[in-house]
Image: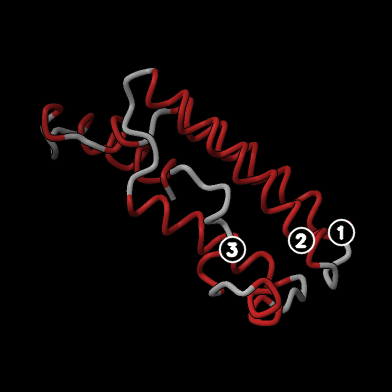
């Protein structure tokens, strides 16, 4: 979504429909951040079908590794002068994690109950963004 928004806005600027000083997408989502986020999500997607979806430990370890990687991307992006993950991006990433786990059969409500957390808090222990 972020890449598509940057490409769309870049085309709008090139066509003269949006002034360059009003373009925001590339500032919010740098190519560097998009590429690293995509790589982190691709690794998560590669590993997801290989873990024991019934094991809270295995699921949470995979989530932890993804969140720590995304934390590092965010930290570097902010250090580079970018905005990092803002509220919308945070919500997108959390929704992606939830949907991905659900698609492979993880019972997130059950996992959350066993961990004494709300389903929406699955990333909270590690998340810095």
Element under disc 3: loop
User: What residue does disc 1 label?
Assistant: 51
Q: Nearer the viewer, mark 2 or mark 1?
A: 2
- Residue closer to the observer: 122 or 115: 115
Q: CA distance from mark 2 to mark 1?
A: 7 Å
Tell me if label 2 and label 1 are in contact, CB under 8 Å.
yes
How would you rate the neighbour count of disc 1 (Cα within 10 Å): few for under 14, some for 14-19, many for 20 or more? some
| Rendered location of residue 93, percent (x, y) | 50, 54
Q: Which of the marked residues, 3 or 2, is nearer the chain's N terminus?
A: 2
Image: 120 above or below 94: below
Residue at the image point whose x is 51% and y is 64% from the top: 95
Task: Give the residue at mark 3.
Answer: 122
Q: Earlier in the sequence, mark 1 or mark 3?
A: 1
Quarter holding the C terminus? Answer: top left
Element under label 2? helix
Q: Which mark is residue 59?
A: 2
């Amino acid at each position: 979504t972020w890449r598509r928004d940057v490409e769309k806005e870049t085309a709008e600027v090139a066509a003269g429909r949006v002034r360059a000083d009003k373009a925001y997408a590339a500032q919010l989502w740098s190519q560097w951040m998009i590429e690293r986020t995509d790589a982190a999500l691709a690794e998560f997607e590669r590993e997801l079908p290989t873990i024991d979806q019934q094991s809270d430990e295995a699921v949470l370890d995979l989530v932890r590794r993804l969140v720590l990687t995304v934390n590092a991307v965010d930290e570097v992006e902010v250090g580079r002068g970018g905005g990092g993950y803002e509220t919308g991006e945070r919500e997108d990433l959390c929704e992606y994690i939830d949907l991905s786990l659900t698609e492979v059969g993880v019972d997130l409500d059950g996992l959350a109950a066993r961990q004494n957390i709300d389903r929406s808090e699955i990333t909270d222990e590690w998340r810095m963004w």
